[in-house]
Every structure is written in C-alpha cells, then in structure tokens.
Image: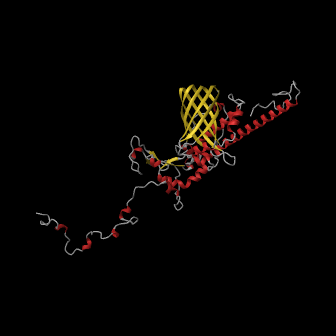
Amino acid sequence: MSNFDAGGFDDFAPAAGAARDDFPRRRDSAADFPRRGDRTATDDFPRRARPRDDGAVGHRASIPETPVRDRPPAWQPDAACDACPTCRARFETFARRHHCRYCGGIFCYACTSRAALMPPQWEGLCGYATRDPQKVCGACSGILQPFQQTWIDENSNQHKANRIDDDASTRYLNSPLRFTLGGEVRKAGITLRNLLGDNANFWEKDAQVFHDQLSGARGLLFLTIAKMAMIGGLRVGTGLVVAKLPDGSWGAPCAVGTLGLSFGAMFGIGISDTVTALDDTALTELADAHTTKISLGVDASLALGPLGRSASGELLGASDASATTQTTYSQTRGFYGGISLNGANLRVRDDVNLKFYGKKVAPADVLRGRVAQPPAARCLYEELGAFFGELEARRRRSAARQAYDYQSQRSAPSGGGAPFGGGAGDPFGADPVVEV
C-alpha cells in the first residue's frame, strides 16, 4: 500500500479555511530572487573581515582618519589562536604565528606582509624602534596609512643624525656586513677617507689610479668584501650605490649586497674596501628589479696585516643579456694572497632600503634621482666633495710641477744643476708628487 493510499500525506494538507498564501510557494520569476546589494536578514550577522588590498588602502579621501592608539597593545597569546583569522590558514610547524605590531592580533605570514611605521609616541614603550617599519595586518595597514607620510618625513631613519667616526677601530677594520643603510653610509665615508687620508695603508701614488678610475663616473659602487679562501673560497659583502645626477649632485644611496665564490691559487682571509666606477649601463642594470645581476672576473690580492692592495677586472652582466666591464683598485687588510677567478651575485637589498626610507622604494626611483637626498647621508656627500676636491687639487699641483720642471730644463744651461725633483728653488717641492 502506498503512503498516499494510507493517508500518509494528509498531514501536509492545508487545514480547512486556511489561506493558500500562508504556505511557501515556488518562485514564479527571477524578480523574486534576492539581488546583490539587497539587504537580507542575514546581513544582521557579523561577517569575517576580508583583507584589504594595497590599491584600496591608498584611496582614503572620503574615509575619516581613525585616532591612533596612545600606547602599544597587549599581544594576543599564541595559545588563543590556532588559525589565521583572515585567511583561515592553520598554524603548523612551518606556518608560524605572526603578531600585528599595531593591534597585537595573531595572523599568518602572508596576512602580515605589509609594513608601516608605528606612532612616534610609542618609542620606549614597545620592544621595537618606531623608526623601523613593522609588520601589520591588512586592517591596521588601512588605519595607519593616512599618517605614514607625516611619520616618514619626521621620524624615519633617513632623518636620523649620522656622522663618521674617525677612530682607529673603524679606520682599519670596516665591517663587511652591515644591516642598516645608515651604517653603510658611514662605512662608505670611511673608505673615502682611507683612500687619500693619513693611515698606515696610504700610498701617494694611489691618487693617480683613483683619478683615472673614478673621473667621469656616472655612479659609484661601495663594497666591503670579506674573502676566505684556500684554493676555493667565499666572498661576501655589503655596501651601497650612489648615482651622479644631471645637475652634478649625488643621488640618494641604495643598499646592495654581494655573495659569490672564487677559485684559484689563493690562501688566507682578507677584507677589501672597494670603490668601483659605474657607467650608465651598469646603473640601468641595477635599477631593473626584474633582472639578476652576475659579476665574473679576475682578482689579484696581497695583504699583510693593515697593508695590502687588490686589483680586479670584472664583467657585470644581467639576465636580460646586457653587460658592462669594470675595473677596481682597492685597499686590502688581513693575511691574504693569490690570483683567483670570481663569480658573484650583486643584488639590491630592498629590506634595508625599506628600513631606512620608511617605505618601499624602487631601485629605479633611488638611482634616477626621484628620491630626495636623505639628511642621514649628508656626511657621505661631504666626504665625496672633499675626496674629489682633493683629487682635483693634486692633479693641478702635479700639472704645475711638470710645467715648472719643463721650463727649468729648457732654461738651464747644458750640464747645469737646474732644480729638478724638489730642489731648493722648487716651489712645488713640499707637495706630494702625483703623476696624472
């Protein structure tokens, strides 16, 4: 017997006198379906917040600014969250928890990939420096965005006081690794002082080499490289690049680093302070963030304690098939000697630039003069001016001396003792002799 025959469906029959409209009906047209944007009953329930994209954060003209917190928040305990509240990714051994530095909440690495400066009034109240951009979640990134440019102009590391110390420990032992661009600026300034300064590794003839090598450069690459070798070896170092702008001034510094291998007849440990002249092709390669920069070359070095020299010739190429040649003559310290073939990768350190400028900056903007000269690099600009000024002064003294010697030879009688090479009547005898 079927259910219908047994009256099984009688329970669903409408009661006597009941209106047909009291029962749910099948929708007759598409107009009865809810549309996107129509308010429904489910709208009264809270929804999980979605991460804001970078494009949406920038358009805040009509969004009122939210007052910033007066004090840093208490961090959410790790045990209180087993999944990211934004993307629902579960935390595991290789998926670690990351705290937003502004709200204190726990998120995954991808959802805290944005960086922002914290309120300056937090300095000393939190366990990190407010001058350094900190990781934040998407919601807090939108809250802090309206204040970022003001804090960058007033509190970022590029406005921090910076000066070059002239003590022996820094003059003779530049660190090959620095993790701040302010430190790289000081290291580059010390390198320039050592090239023409009064120190144990100074040699007057270096001025001729540096003048020939660096004159007319479109940019300068400063690197302090540590070499460790025994037939095969490792090369690692950090530094910066500054470009010369069309008006003759120097642009903002850009942090770089190098890591490579060497092979040849060499042994020991040494540190070299290098200054390399860059042409337009090399600057274009460094400014292109989408290419990989590789250098291949030959290096000859000899160092005994604080005394030593290194000379190298390199081919700097990029993954887009562009290439340029470079020669480097530098001071070296340590116990190292040999001739080697080198291969290294040269890259822009975006994380160091972010920490210094307070925001992400493209290498092309830095090297093409679109980023203003930072006050923290003023000491480097002063050293560059003094360095090239001294090179030019020595070149002029050398030219004047050569002219004086030439006139002395022509006016002196044959076999006479004309002053030559700094005699008593030589007005240039007290100056260093530099042939240019």
Q: Nearest the camera: 191 or 276?
A: 276
Residue 139 in view: yes
Image point 39% across, 50% down: which residue?
Answer: 88
Quadrant where the image shows the C terminus: top right
Residue 129: x %, y % from top left: 55, 44
Determine if residue 183 is in view: no
Q: Nearer the viewer, residue 426 or 159?
A: 426
Vertically, is 61 above or below 120? below
Left/right of residue 71 with respect to residue 373 in the rendered view: left
Color scheme of the displayed model? secondary structure
Q: Position of residue 329 (x, y in %)?
A: 65, 33
Q: Quadrant of the N terminus?
A: bottom left
Viewer-nearest residue: 214 or 142: 214
Coordinates of residue 376 in the picture (x, y in percent) = 64, 44
Residue pushed farthest right? 413
Q: Quadrant of residue 98?
A: top left
